[in-house]
Image (cartoon, helix red, strand yellow):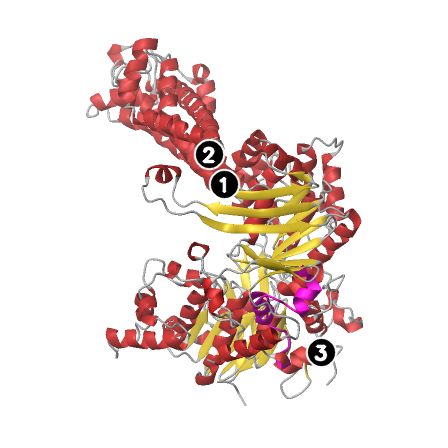
Amino acid sequence: MSSVADASLSTPDRQRFPLLRALLADPFTCVALILVTGFLITAVFAPWLAPYSPIKIDVLHKLQPPSLAHWFGTDHLGRDLLSRVIHGARTALTIAMVSVAIAGAIGLLLGLIAGYGPRWLDAILVLTFDSLNSLPMIMFALAIITVLGAGTGTLIIVIAATSFPSYARLIRAQTLALRNSDYILAERLLDASAARIIFIHLLPNVVGPLIILLSMDIPVVIMVEAGLSFLGLGVRPPTPSWGSILYDGYTSIRAAPFMVIFGGLPLVLATLGFTFLGEGLRDYLDPRLQLRRPA
Amino acid sequence: MSPLLAVEDLSVSFARGGLLNRLINPFPLPSFNVIDRVTLSLMPGETLGLVGESGSGKTTLARTILGLVQAAAGRIAFEGRDVKTQADFRAMRRRSAMMFQDPVASLSPRLRIGTLLTEPQVIQGVPMPDRRAAGRALLALVGLPASFVDRFPHELSGGQARRVCVARALAMKPHLLLADEPTAGLDVSVQGDVLNLIGELKRELGFAAIIVTHNLAMIRHVSDRLAIMYLGRLVETGPTQDVFSSPMHPYTATLIQSEPIPDPRRRGQNPAVNGEIPSVFRRPSGCEFHTRCPIARDRCKAEAPAYRKIGADRMVRCHFPLETGGQEREAFSRASTNQRGN
Amino acid sequence: MTGALAARDLSVRYETQHGSVHALRHVDIEAHPGEVIGIVGESGCGKSTLVTALANLLPANARIDGCISWNGVDLAKLDAHRQRLLRGDEIALVSQDPMTAFNPVLTIGDQLVDFQHHRKDIGRARKRARIAAMLGRVGISDAERRMQSYPHELSGGMRQRVAIAAALLTDPGLLIADEPTTALDVTMEAQIIHLLRELRREYNGIIIVVSHHLGVIAELCDRVYVMYAGEVVEGGEVDAIFHDARHPYTQALLACDPARFHERLDRLPTIPGVLPNLTAPPCGCVYAPRCDRAFAPCGTIAPPLVKLSASHVARCHAVTP
């Protein structure tokens, strides 16, 4: 329902899909949204979109340059590169988004508790964050894999566990800056519960930078996944991932440079897409950054 | 009639250095009283003006009364009962309200005005069938258009945000309102609006108020009694009219004289006081005002004056209070003129 | 007689995404050497835009019409280089918050030496001596020690004194003090007013004091311009403005000041209504929607500037000389 506004005080109209409208208003965010949506659709419908099986080996046609039959060419085992890139999107996005989401949620919660909770709890949590941060990721991954075995699930656990401390520290710093602000004091005076203050008043004001960071970290995680997969600590070999395509490409970069290009291109586009989307979201989430009417 | 709020010997000290420093440092830094033995009482329905310059501790005192700052010593009683534990403070806060100096900063920035206005009711579990309608009713109470329910705090002007804060403070019909600089940053044509609104609602709802301010021109029209603070201590209290017509503490007198008069025919010749307010960390010996006082004598440097009662309803912390028309008053005006001359 | 500084039919508008904001419209002011000019008005009245225009510091999206003449030179038509020279030498600005006027990592002495960079003719030692003398003039007793301090080590009142000293170092012909006492406590405010009043005895340039505080204006100024919604609605000798105000807005503004009443008032006077929208200023009198004396022409015809006496003018249909 729209309320009646008097002439001199124009109220912003309540529109449908305000988030989408705001995001599409900015050309960069618009491009980002198209890219991210494209990758998501590719990931979801990979089996239907891919022209060939991504794991079918055809050594006779290895390292074929791009052609009508194989748009992206074939790799050193003769697998269709386009199909591997399409299926790789599924692997990359699943791992990146799930692990970043888990890490973000844990970081957000623990950061808020550390920032707003009692000081002794803060001390314990900060110690925990720093200890986890100091673990070398590869060693940690090796240790976890020894216990759980390699695979997608393990990869997600490793990435989430090593990246949430930095998110938590960011949120904690933001929360500390806000805990003595006037509006939090005002809420305390209204006798608002700690949960209410944390989730209604602190969370929306600290989550903005986290969302940008998470969005920008998704491509980093895709790279990490690629690196770990290359070391044999991530996705098992026949499963296609952008990382493994890239690393396969490096080994035959002189014979078939197109492999690195087509393996790297989605990574670059995903990085741009998620980064711009993060910035667009930040602008939307902080109403103070929106252009104000002239006074 | 028993007082609504009684504060006795309330002190707040800021320890210097962190906990670890205090535990292991063999030469611990002494702690300082930013509020020092303040005694106040407030009758139901009364308006007290708490006046002082920046650094006088008036905001800290207001926050301590509601338990936002922890007191080091002293006693607070609200509606006849001692307020000691966190539960006591919570119970007291349910029957009191505070308005902050910066109205926009005291409203949660991501929530809409309608949500913010009805938050006190939601927190205290008051049943509300239609939250938007309740928000509109509160906006109407403070004279703002109903369309404001969908606005964000940063979209309001200073005066509008003040009104929202008034509505929010008074939504639960408190017995006590603490207002910190309720007119800071407002234009003179708007500040009257906000004060009239508080005055009207006060007559209607009958709450008592403490108004923290440095604006003397404003406070003389809205308060019944005044308490003047200097460096965390009360230096004078009394009925507003009496304090303005015959200030007893030289500091009060200099404050009143310093106020610029909007009349070019009555230009003050010279400033009533020189020097600056000292830091609480380096409190002067004896009477802390002696460094700036135009009539300070030797005794003032050595001996701290007691906070004593003069007449029926006035208290003053001065060895040589200015009596109406008496010798001291003449000495004061002479001394301050001489001091200004140099 | 033409003053050293004069603005004639000066209009400034800001081009924004939401249209042009007509922040200043048809402003005429003049100031003569040795005068203290007060510009008073509430927020949104355009007083900041006016002084920024006088100091040539308007942002890039501002468009100026009319002329600002300074000793016969039209400032708006000067090229950027000469504008900058003029700004450094002739025009000095003291802002509301002196903390932001200083670089926090340099000592006061170093910054004040820097302010004299255009004086190639005198050496560093001589510059420091000038600073010490100037700090003494603004009432800072231990000037040598203060020159070693950093801005944050000074109190608000002290910083404002230093800011005034810095402004006077270049011996400007025009000193603009924008809300010089707003950030200060009342006892410091009285001291800064006193200081400015003392300084004008030896200073023979123009001082412009901008304030929303009627008391400060009454204490300091010789002539006053009252602004409302981007226009000068009344101007005249300070005594005429405070004791014989003719424009309804000036009268209402004066009536609102609680400092004028010594007896307790149950209701403080206010001015009902809101400022007009400056993206589309009303075609008649800007104050008509809030004016209790508005009559037929006020809503449609912009009132002329009525000359009431040699120096007293008011922009209102209801006043007659």
Q: Position of residue C117 (x, y in %)?
A: 30, 72
Q: Is residue B103 above or below residue A59?
A: below
Q: Position of residue A55 (x, y in %)?
A: 33, 11
- Label 3: which residue? C246
Gap between marks 2 and 3 measured at Cα: 59 Å
Please report contact status of discs 2 and 1: CB closer than 8 Å, yes or no.
Answer: yes
Q: Secondary structure at mark 3?
A: loop
Q: Position of residue B294 (x, y in %)?
A: 51, 72
Q: Is residue B77 visible?
A: yes
Q: In this orientation, which residue lies closer to the viewer: C11 or A169?
A: A169
Q: Secondary structure at mark 1?
A: helix
Q: Is residue A65 visible?
A: no
Q: Secondary structure at mark 2?
A: helix
Q: Is residue C229 above or below residue C5?
A: above
Side of B100 relative to C208 (left or right): right
- Find the magenta span and give its range: B238-265
- The quadrant holding residue B217 is bottom right
Name the chain letter of the residue that bears numbered label 2: A
Gap between marks 1 and 3 measured at Cα: 50 Å
Q: Hey, what amino acid is under mark 2?
A: Gly
Q: Hey, what amino acid is under mark 1?
A: Leu
Disc 1: CA contacts within 10 A as few (<14), some (14-19) or many (>=20): some
- The quadrant holding residue B223 is bottom right
**Sequence-first tag of 2 and 1:** 2
